[in-house]
Image: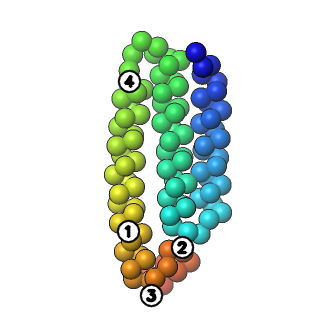
Amino acid sequence: MIPVEYFFVLSALLFFIGVFGFVTRRNLITMLISIELILNSVDINFAAFNRILFPGQLEGFFFTLFSIGVSAAETAVAVAIIINVYRNFKSDQVNIIKNMKN
């Protein structure tokens, strides 16, 4: 049996890697991947806290499944937006999108 603390450490690592990737990258795809890392760290926390607080119940796992579904829908919409940005501006860099304000 894996100790629950390992899940928290993994979740914290995924969260900080995601935040670092989101802040430092200028490519829309890598920013989307970073957001997905952050959401996956939240899912791991849901499951780990469910294991600690309610060992025989499945509320945390249902929240995790719901969150995965929302993440999938968010990713589909984000990829569609990125494809449209690329078609219009021929680039997937964030600083190119500033032209949309004009």
Q: Name the residue under label 1.
A: 81
**First of labels 1, 4 by sequence position:** 4
- How was this image coloured? rainbow
Q: Name the residue under label 3.
A: 102
Report, in whole angstroms, how far the alpha carbon at label 3 lies from the one at label 4: 47 Å
> Disc 2 residue type?
Val
| Residues tagged 3 and 1 counted as in contact (Cβ below 8 A) | no
State which mark lies toward you, 3 or 1: 1
| Mark 1 residue element | helix
| Residues tagged 1 and 4 counted as in contact (Cβ below 8 A) | no
> Callout 1: few (<14), some (14-19), or many (20+) C-alpha neighbours within 10 Å?
few
In the rendered view, tell whether residue 49 sits above or below residue 89: above
Q: Quadrant of residue 82?
A: bottom left
Q: Which of 79 and 16 is in front in this view?
A: 79
**First of labels 3, 2 by sequence position:** 2
> Disc 3 residue type?
Asn
Does 98 sit left or right of 59 as displayed?
right
State which mark lies toward you, 3 or 2: 2
Q: Name the residue under label 2.
A: 94
| Residues tagged 3 and 4 counted as in contact (Cβ below 8 A) | no
State which mark lies toward you, 3 or 4: 4
Does 67 sit left or right of 91 as displayed?
left
Q: Where is residue 60 in the image (x, y as percent from the top left)?
A: 42, 26
Give the total number of marks visible in the rendering.
Answer: 4
**First of labels 3, 1 by sequence position:** 1
> Disc 4 residue type?
Glu
Q: Position of residue 84 (x, y in %)?
A: 37, 74
Report, in whole angstroms, how far the alpha carbon at label 3 lies from the one at label 2: 15 Å
